[in-house]
Amino acid sequence: MLTLVYGGELYSPNYLGKKDVLITQDKIQDISDNINVQSDALQKIDATDKYVVPGFLDGHVHITGGGGEGGFSTRTPEINFSDLTTAGITTVIGCLGTDGTTRSMKDLIAKARSLTEEGLTAYILSGSYRVPITTLTGDVQDDIVLIPEVLGVGEIAVSDHRAFLPTLSELKKLAAEVRVGSMLSGKKGVINVHMGDGKRLFKDINQLIDETEIPAFHFVVTHGNRTGEIFEEGLEFIKKGGFLDLTTSTVKKFLESGEVKCSKALRYFHENELSFDNITFSSDGQGSLPNFDENGNYLGLKVGGVSSLFREVKEAVLDEKVPFEKALSVITKNPAKAFGLENKGEIDKGKAGDLVLLDNNSLEIDTVISKGKVLIKDKQLLVKGTFE
């Protein structure tokens, strides 16, 4: 199977000018000013007046659903294949959340494999909010070494009224298991931390990094924009080499109570000439956005949407005047680096044939190609999930 995308302006996410891209099977074979290929198996996609960008990577999606903080009826549903593709997402990382009881690791790995069979690339993280964490094999290190889809652990909750109050010693042991497991498996090894707005904030994570030999680059701290205080501490955290992940799904109350809107956070980085390298966006898709009162009593919830991922990038560009290639990096190159996915997040020879075509004025998603297969073309959904 050969796919030629021609006539578009290429962002790798760095701007490369007007280029053609040739995909063979599931990988990029060539990038050139004018590719001339003759084959009966060739399909051509005209990218004139389009931006050609890498497929988006969402590093935090509750692919089997989440929630449950208000009882069984508040368990959010699992994600549909086309929810991801219409949002431009070609690579997704699934995780559990608050509920590690009625949501299982077996369900998580099965859902990830189904999304991969249907045409995306899906990985998972072992565990949930709970420490000690729930695994597939019974051992953190074994999960990372023996199961290809497992990239690390998460979403481990700290500084939150729903956290299982992990001790510093437990966190150190967990980080060490991830570190060794990553070395044995050739993976990067990720410790995805849910940062709540409690009193301790980054204290335990910073102390762990300062007191051990565990490199900070293993840590991806999510919900880094939930409050201004978290965001400010997160700016110091990335100086250590960790990754600060900003959540794009939100509700009005979060914004009114001090949450930093993702698009405005990027403007802050741009205006202050800060490096974008260790900043990522994720959607928290299908996760619950619960509302609690000041005493921790449940009041209600909404459901996070993966469509928010690119929406915040688009707003950063169109409304906040952040350079396109900088904004694009937080859902392409940066999360690929954060999770150690070397063949993802950039348009380059030998990398995955994952592309998104955007209208160059409105930045609306026009075409989505995943592993060389066209899933959406001219805004028309060509491939649906098995039961959609």
Image (cartoon, helix red, strand yellow):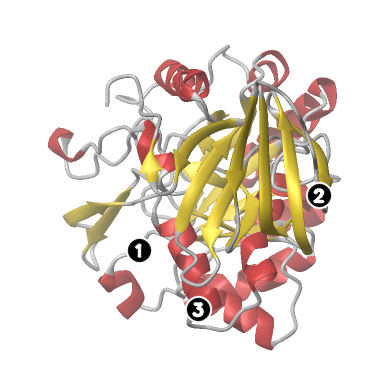
Between marks 1 and 3, how big is the CA–CA gap?
Answer: 20 Å
- Residue found 42% across the figure and 22% down from its top: 111
- Judging depth in this view, the residue of 370 and 207 nearest the camera is 370
Read off the residue under disc 2: 34
Q: Position of residue 124 (x, y in %)?
A: 55, 29
Q: Position of residue 185 (x, y in %)?
A: 79, 21
Question: Label 3's element?
Answer: helix
- Residue found 40% across the figure and 49% down from its top: 379
30 sits left or right of 374 in the view: right
Read off the residue under disc 1: 250
Question: Label 2's element?
Answer: loop
Question: Label 1's element?
Answer: loop
Tell me which label, 2 or 3, sits earlier in the chain. Answer: 2
Read off the residue under disc 3: 318
232 sits left or right of 13 in the view: left
Is residue 199 something that shows in the picture?
no
Tell which tag, 2 or 1, sits nearer the viewer.
Answer: 2
Query: Which amino acid type corresponds to the residue marked 2 in the rendered image?
Result: Asn
Task: Report the disc number at residue 157.
Answer: none
In the image, residue 177 above or below residue 334: above
In the image, residue 158 above or below residue 79: below
- Judging depth in this view, the residue of 112 and 117 nearest the camera is 117
Q: Position of residue 308 (x, y in %)?
A: 40, 58
Query: Which amino acid type corresponds to the residue marked 3 in the rendered image?
Result: Leu
